[in-house]
Image (tube, coloured by chain):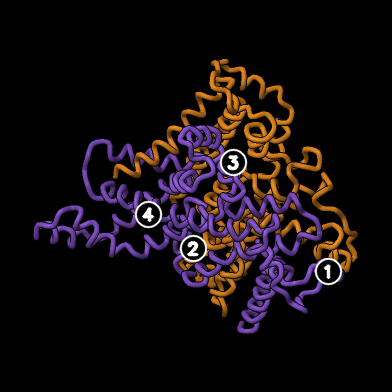
Amino acid sequence: MLPGLVLFAAFRLYPLLDGLRLSFTNARLGRAQYAFVGFANYEKLLEDTRFHVSLVNTAFYAAASTLPILAIPLALAIGLNRGIALRTFLRGAFFFPFTLSVVTVGLTWLWLLDPVVGPFNYYLRALGIPARSWLADPATAMWAIIMTSVWWVTGYYLVIYLAGLQDIPRELYEAAALDGASGWRSFWSVTVPLLRPVFLFVFVTHVIGSFQIFGQVFILTQGGPGDATRTVVQHLYETAFQNFFQFGSASAMAWVLFAVILIFSLFQFRLLRGHTQY
Amino acid sequence: MRSRQGVLGALMVVAAVLWLLPAVWVLVTSLKPTANIIRVPPEWIPWPATLAHYVEVLFSSSRTARIGRAFLNSTVVSVGAVILVVFTSALAAYPLARMRFPGRDLIFVILVGSLMIPNAVVLVPQYILTQQLGWLSTYQGLIVPEAAMTFAFGVFLLRQFFLTLPTELEDAARIDGASPWHIFTRIVLPLSQPVLGALSIFAFRSAWNDFLWPLIAVNKPEMFPLPVALALLRSAYSSESYGPIMAGATLSAIPLLVVFLLANRRIIEGVRVGGLKS
């Protein structure tokens, strides 16, 4: 088992701890000598308004995309779970975007949303909705990114929901029908409660992923217009590798991000444990 | 009842077709001559069709021609990462599932806990480490970190599978005097083909599609993998370059599409079993 553990220790554990150490230094790209500066990097983050903006944007993205990510794959999974023909093909169609890289997905939507010649605006205009530059308008740019992400990952969560739905015993629906429950009623009193662990799994996975959003933003808006779609990982990337090459400061950001994600996942794992007995 | 089923089926087919339209639009665009690409209203049948954009990105000497080389780079890196992950995680998972030794449970807990480490958090230290090894812009500088990202998940997946294998076969072989290594390679691995296949697909997908790490770890254009090469084409982006970009995007989607068509069931199973990580 040794080769794997060496790989793991050198390229996962060591970088994690080294990042913590770097966050207390003034390391830069190419600077051989650097000094410990205590909490200076973290104090700077308290004043870094662009970092605050990116935290707020990232939280907004995570929150605003949660409902579509919980609801759309569920609705599709319920539709597919009724034993309709072509099920495998349909599931494959929804899953397909998830096999693409974030870059391919981003380029696809960049082209669809092109303000002048993109088909998205063309068909909206045909429906009587005025054309606009979705990605260049601060009011809509983040929503366009959310739409892109939903298209990308829906197939993945659809498969998770389908597995959850198949674990619900048929008898429960039959019993509900015998008691005179409508389809809607049995959805709320059978499906939803029994899917609770699946909802929590989808929710946690999605939030943890959302806090790391980078590729969509990099391709579609590069954080713009202004800083309207700037996210934490993008800010970290630019701080470390594009503008300033400040490794110390970027490492501090990384650990703030890690702390947020960790608190979230620990909290949700407790919830998950508390609620799975029924 | 039957007609309601039919309506639902038809609705799902419409939803699936709409869901695939963005991808179809990419393919259609890639086959059009440049002058036809930006025509409004959008033309969904690429006629006259041309492969000029594919020839350009694969063979010409212009800047868009990095796609052909990038395709090769991505193939080398992804195949290398798959081999390394499958090899190392199988070797680590077997003792964790079958042998007793001090620290076994601790190692497993650390590995599972590490699944919560976001890639963005180890970005800077991993860059410094790769630089110190002299691995920037090399294949090993991409393969080894990509493998390290998937290793813990691979161990988790394989250990769970090994635990479900009946021990009788291994016991019988041991009584016949077979060495542990012999048992592992001749009995356990052949029985594990399905899960090894699922892990290979997972590792291939994550290496083929990763964007953030190669974006910083490679700074020689001839070493770019596909997502980076495509993303940088975007900076040269104008309506002129939609053709080559969409041809590159289509090419980048093909390997996983093929894998997906061949192993649809297995991928879905993999997502379900390993729902832990996306």
Front: mark 2 or 4: 4
Q: Determine which quarter of the picture holds residue A81.
A: bottom right
From the image, tell me which residue sits under label 2. A163
From the image, tell me which residue sits under label 1. B35
Disc with the residue nearer the chain's start (1 vs 3): 1
Chain orange in the figure, letter: A
Q: Amino acid at mark 1?
A: Ala
Residue B216's tag is 3
Image position of A32 with respect to A84: above or below: above
Front: mark 3 or 2: 3
Disc with the residue nearer the chain's start (3 vs 4): 4
From the image, tell me which residue sits under label 4. B86
Report the front residue among A60 and B19.
B19
Helix or strand or loop: what does disc 2 sit on? helix
Q: CA distance from mark 3 to mark 4?
A: 25 Å
Helix or strand or loop: what does disc 4 sit on? helix
Question: Residue B71 placed where, x, y %?
Answer: 57, 59
Front: mark 1 or 4: 1
Residue projecting furthest to the left? B176
Give the letter of the chain under mark 3. Answer: B
Give the letter of the chain under mark 2. Answer: A
Disc with the residue nearer the chain's start (1 vs 4): 1
Q: Is residue A241 left or right of residue A126?
A: left
Residue projecting furthest to the front? B61
Q: Determine which quarter of the picture holds residue B54.
A: bottom right
